[in-house]
């Protein structure tokens, strides 16, 4: 009881002297929850490889809106350009890193289908039925080979492992995963060698 009365007396003396209570907030952002927008951005960046088909579909839809409003008479040029691009990818894709024939066929097919949908959307409008349904179904169909591609999945695993190791290097050594490579392997120069070393045989 004595200590309680003493604390109240000291508090009254402090208030009489003009001092006001203050609260100190640390500037460490890790003490506060991240906003929803930041969390969504981190999720999209982490799974950017898996979300690539969805991103292509969104870009194609936006491009269809723009071409329908500004380039409605140029649909034939868009169709011809996509056809030529698909042909070049199919026959000359090896010069651009698409050595396996399966990858060239997939890229050429996706290019031609996207160009054909964009040409029709340029004339009719991207939201004219059944264009939105065709875009959704085509995105899912073309996304399955992309998600199942072994070389893409191996590259993603290597990149995420290196990113986790670089993050753990900033923490204590005891909390770092045992499977992390040496610090020299976490640099940008080692990323290419690690990804090439983990590259399995083509599909």
Image (tube, rainbow, N blue to C red):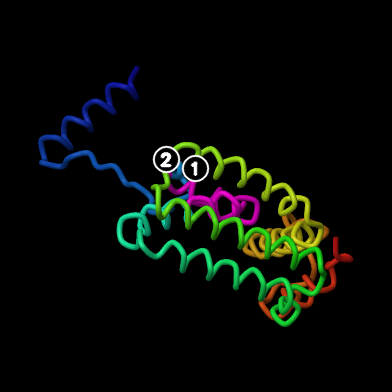
Crowding at mark 2 (Cα within 10 Å: few <14, some 14-19, many 20+): few
Per the rendered image, the range of residues in magenta is: 35-58
Magenta stretch encompasses residue 16: no
SS assignment for the magenta stretch, majority: helix
Residue that appears at 64% across and 56% down: 49
Marking on residue 62: none
User: Can you tell which quarter of the image residue 135 is in?
Assistant: top right
Quadrant in which the N terminus is drawn: top left
Q: Are marks 2 and 1 in contact (CB under 8 Å)?
A: yes
Relative to 78, does residue 132 appear above or below in the rendering? above
- Name the residue tied to disc 1: 131
- Given the current orientation, which residue lies at the most extreme top position? 1
Compared across the picture, whether 123 is left or right of 143 comes to: left
Which quadrant is home to the C terminus? bottom right
As drawn, 192 above or below 113: below
Residue at figure coordinates x 56%, y 57% from the top left: 114
The label number, if any, that marks residue 128 in the structure image: 2
**Is 43 one of the magenta-colored residues?**
yes
On the picture, is 66 further left or further right than 20? right
Residue 82, horizontal then vertical, whole percent: 56, 67
Answer with left or right where residue 101 lies relative to residue 82.
right
């Amino acid at each position: 009881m004595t200590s309680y009365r003493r604390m109240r007396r000291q508090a009254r003396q402090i208030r009489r002297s003009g001092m006001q209570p203050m609260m100190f907030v640390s500037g460490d952002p890790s003490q506060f929850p991240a906003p929803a927008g930041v969390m969504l951005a981190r999720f999209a960046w982490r799974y950017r490889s898996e979300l690539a088909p969805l991103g292509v579909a969104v870009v194609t839809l936006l491009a269809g809106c723009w071409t329908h409003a500004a380039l409605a008479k140029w649909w034939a040029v868009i169709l011809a350009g996509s056809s030529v691009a698909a042909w070049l990818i199919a026959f000359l894709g090896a010069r651009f890193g698409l050595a396996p024939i399966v990858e060239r066929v997939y890229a050429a097919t996706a290019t031609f289908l996207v160009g054909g949908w964009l040409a029709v959307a340029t004339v009719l409008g991207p939201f004219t039925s059944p264009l939105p349904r065709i875009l959704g179904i085509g995105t899912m169909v073309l996304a399955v080979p992309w998600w199942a591609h072994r070389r893409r999945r191996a590259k993603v695993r290597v990149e995420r492992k290196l990113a986790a190791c670089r993050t753990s290097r900033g923490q204590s050594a005891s909390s770092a995963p045992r499977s992390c490579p040496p610090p020299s392997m976490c640099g940008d120069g080692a990323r290419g060698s690690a990804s090439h070393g983990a590259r399995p045989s083509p599909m």
